[in-house]
Image (cartoon, rainbow, N blue to C red):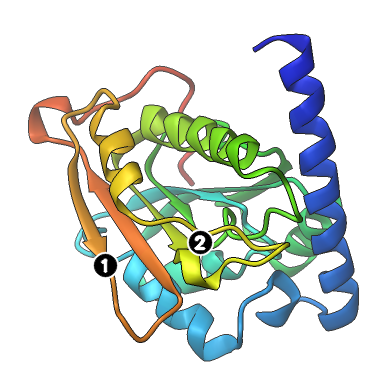
Amino acid sequence: MDDTTIQAYARVLSRVAMVYHCTLEEHGATAPGVAWRDDIYQHRGFERLTSGIDRRRPVTVNDVGCGYGALFGYLDRHFTLAGYCGTDICEAMIEAAGRRVQDPRARFAQNAMPMAAADWSIASGTFNLSAGTDGLLWRKIVEDVLREMARLSRIGFAVSMLRPDGASEFLWGSEPEPWLRFCHAQPGGWKLTIDDAPDEPEWRLIAVRAPAHMGTPSGDSLPVR
């Protein structure tokens, strides 16, 4: 990545982080504080994004755009969670997550990308808020994050995105088809599923590695506690 691109990314992500800082100050560590409609919608999103995870086995998870760490609680209630790393571009969110989740299985870091290999990587709505970023640049950022999620996920990854008709000056949306093609092109022999409920503003993509490709990706693994 050249210096110009790095600087462009930094400007964009700084602007988005400031928006999240403001929503957190206004609403606190709640679903609206990370731009979810309410707790019910947040829970439903978590439920659908984690539908591919095997509940019979311990699991490690990267939470990309973790906000105040709400997904950790959901995973802990519904799965045997062995390790978790939440990353977010907003420093205030990382601080809120660290205060809220004080568990030896969890760690949080200010970063746009997942930082270590895990069984699954989840991005629940983090791509939706672009804060007025040029569409082509935002799409490139989404591609880079997805590429890293695929690289570092041993079993699968899942993301949610707004439909185009939900987009606005500050919100970004897309149809599923370009992302099906993009994820299909990533190494790993991915089996891709679209969860597209017509009564909801978001659709979800769930990707599972082909059995022959499952294993440890390149990079360090999350510590298991």
Say whether residue 56 is left or right of residue 101.
left
Across and down, in percent, residue 123 comes to: 49, 54
Q: Can you tell which of label 2 and label 1 is closer to the viewer?
A: 1
Q: Quadrant of residue 57?
A: bottom left
Q: Seen from this angle, which residue lies furthest top?
A: 2
Amino acid bearing label 2: Ser
Tell me what residue is drawn at x 68 percent, y 73 percent. Answer: 35
Q: Nearer the viewer, residue 101 or 1?
A: 1
Q: Earlier in the sequence, mark 2 or mark 1?
A: 2
- Expressed as whole percent of the image width and height from the top left, the position of residue 114 reads 55, 37
User: What residue did someone put label 1 on?
Assistant: 195
Residue 124 is marked as: 2
Q: Looking at this view, is 183 or 70 the one in front?
A: 183
Q: Quadrant of the N terminus?
A: top right
- Mark 2–mark 1 distance (CA, rounded to whole Å): 13 Å
- The one nearer the camera, 5 or 103, is 5
**In the rendered structure, which amino acid carries the disc numbered 1?**
Asp
